[in-house]
Image: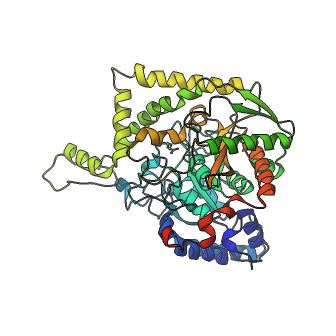
């Protein structure tokens, strides 16, 4: 009997379509798995059990009548709790939205439902997607299935942990500065941030709108590509949506042919602050790609080192504007509405109680950066840096087809290790932020272990060349699986003992 929770999405889709297993069996297997392991992992904030089983039943019925559905029909998926899905609470991991039930469904989730995917529930994240560890969630952190004392990355740590703990074969994430790629890197899974405008932001709770981008999370490159194909493409409901066909990511993921491809290694990423094991795995992966037929060039992107400081002006500026809507008047939390307080007092009491420390820090920082006397010095300068980063990418494409770098400077750190030091937390996204600033496609793929924990390999491609990210990712996956004799996740210590060890609780 196939172990359904360890089977990848492409294979599950095939088994369901050929009626070797039913979507109901697959869905139940994942719900049972969640029941068994999510206590210590805490990847999920809410489950949608009844609707999931009803959807699975209807998919099975449609297949039984001979209807031909897409390749992922009947396959379960976990959804980051930032996507609106009608009648299921959407919290963004904030007290501000606790108990709020959206009256509509985001385009990305709608497309998943149309493709026959079965939504299992909503996954944990840092509050309003701000953080690199899920520790700013108002509902407690998620634990990394590789080592439950460590962070699963963030903000999308719940989605990544759900994949790594075999609670779901697919998940949805959003990436503003690295929130798909960094969690993928530290959990040994795959995560892709599509080109900005390549997936719709409609119905995704806004954080920093010029940077936010929904994307696929999976355990294999092909699974991520199949999900990307489902969720990608033009949406008239999102004014920044690109009206062009989705690049052929599935063909690229199936091919994995990198013969003659020019791979640019970003010179500026490495050295101080990078864990030696991370750098070693990264360089070995580059060599493996050369063995597979790729050419390597060293590329200088001199402005990438300013991406992090510029991000921490632009991102908070947009946050301060987007989070202004939580004013206690329209929806969400309301505190002090007892007839003795003015509207201003109710707003201030609500915002004081409803937002956590990180959200407040960003709102204050952003409001300051946008204030009249400082606008040019801070926000204006950061926007100029953003242009220079985009130019670095443009210059790079003259000599290479993709850029590569480690996804993160270190492997998963311990829970609590960086909570008192925001700057240390922010540095987790050192290598991922440039692609958000310029709107490029980028993905993270497992490339080995350092100190027994997963290391991520980042591939960045030009705008609307998302297929190249998958091509390189698939090449790497193939080479490394041959070397390891199977997927990296099979080497996770806690995943064989299944969380039953004393120290795992
Ligand atoms: N860690 C980054 C931040 O805190 C990125 C978050 C994200 O991509 N949503 O802003």
Residue 447: in sight, yes or no? yes
Q: Nearer the viewer, residue 188 or 79?
A: 188
> What is the total number of numbered labels drawn onto the structure image?
0
Q: Nearer the viewer, residue 164 or 504?
A: 504
Q: Would you say 227 lies left or right of 316 here?
A: right
Where residue 246 sits, quadrant-wise, is: top right
Where residue 323 sits, quadrant-wise, is: top left
* Residue occupying image coordinates x 50% and y 25%: 383
Q: Nearer the viewer, residue 81 or 291?
A: 291
User: Residue 269 appears at what percent x and percent y?
Assistant: 62, 33
Q: Quadrant of the N terminus?
A: bottom right
Q: Nearer the viewer, residue 407 or 224?
A: 407
* Residue occupying image coordinates x 76% and y 72%: 15
* Residue occupying image coordinates x 42% and y 61%: 101
Q: Would you say 377 lies left or right of 260 here?
A: left
Q: Would you say 305 lies left or right of 474 here?
A: left
User: Residue 318 appears at what percent x and percent y?
Assistant: 44, 36
Residue 50: in sight, yes or no? no
């Amino acid at each position: 009997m196939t172990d359904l929770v360890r089977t990848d999405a492409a294979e599950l889709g095939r088994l369901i379509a050929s009626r070797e297993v039913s979507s109901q069996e697959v869905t139940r297997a994942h719900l049972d798995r969640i029941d068994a392991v999510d206590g210590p992992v805490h990847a999920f904030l809410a489950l949608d059990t009844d609707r999931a089983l009803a959807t699975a039943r209807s998919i099975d019925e449609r297949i039984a009548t001979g209807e031909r559905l897409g390749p992922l029909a009947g396959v379960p998926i976990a959804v980051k709790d930032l996507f609106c899905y009608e009648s299921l609470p959407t919290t963004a991991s904030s007290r501000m939205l606790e108990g709020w039930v959206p009256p509509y469904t985001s385009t990305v989730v709608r497309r998943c439902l149309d493709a026959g995917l079965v939504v299992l529930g909503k996954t944990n994240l840092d509050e309003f997607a701000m953080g690199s560890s899920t520790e700013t969630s108002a509902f407690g952190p998620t634990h990394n299935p590789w080592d439950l004392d460590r962070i699963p990355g963030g903000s999308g740590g719940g989605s990544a942990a759900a994949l790594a703990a075999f609670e779901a074969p697919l998940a949805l994430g959003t990436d503003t500065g690295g929130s798909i790629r960094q969690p993928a890197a530290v959990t040994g899974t795959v995560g892709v941030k599509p080109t900005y405008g390549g997936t719709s932001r409609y119905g995704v709770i806004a954080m920093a709108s010029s940077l936010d981008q929904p994307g696929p999370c999976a355990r294999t490159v092909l699974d991520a590509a199949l999900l990307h194909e489902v969720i990608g493409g033009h949406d008239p409901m999102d004014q920044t949506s690109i009206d062009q066909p989705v690049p052929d990511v599935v063909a690229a993921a199936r091919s994995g042919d990198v013969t003659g491809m020019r791979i640019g290694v970003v010179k500026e990423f490495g050295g101080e602050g990078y864990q030696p094991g991370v750098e070693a795995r990264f360089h070995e992966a580059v060599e493996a790609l050369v063995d597979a037929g790729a050419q390597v060039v060293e590329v200088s992107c001199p402005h990438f080192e300013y991406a992090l400081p510029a991000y921490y002006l632009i991102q908070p500026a947009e946050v301060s504007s987007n989070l202004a809507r939580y004013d206690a008047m329209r929806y969400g939390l309301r505190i002090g509405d007892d007839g003795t307080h003015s509207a201003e007092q109710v707003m201030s009491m609500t915002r004081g109680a409803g937002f956590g420390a990180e959200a407040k820090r960003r709102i204050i920082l952003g409001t300051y950066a946008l204030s009249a006397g400082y606008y040019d010095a801070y926000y204006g300068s950061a926007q100029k840096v953003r242009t220079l980063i985009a130019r670095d990418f443009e210059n790079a494409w003259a000599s290479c087809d993709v850029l590569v770098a480690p996804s993160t400077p270190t492997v998963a750190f311990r829970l609590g290790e960086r909570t008192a030091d925001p700057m240390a937390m922010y540095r987790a996204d050192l290598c991922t932020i440039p692609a958000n600033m310029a709107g490029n496609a980028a993905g993270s793929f497992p490339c080995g272990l350092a100190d027994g924990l997963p290391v991520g390999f980042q591939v960045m491609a030009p705008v609307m060349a998302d297929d190249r990210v998958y091509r390189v990712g698939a090449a790497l996956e193939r080479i490394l699986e041959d070397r390891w004799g199977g997927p990296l996740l099979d080497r996770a210590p806690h995943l064989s003992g299944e969380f039953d060890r004393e120290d795992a609780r």
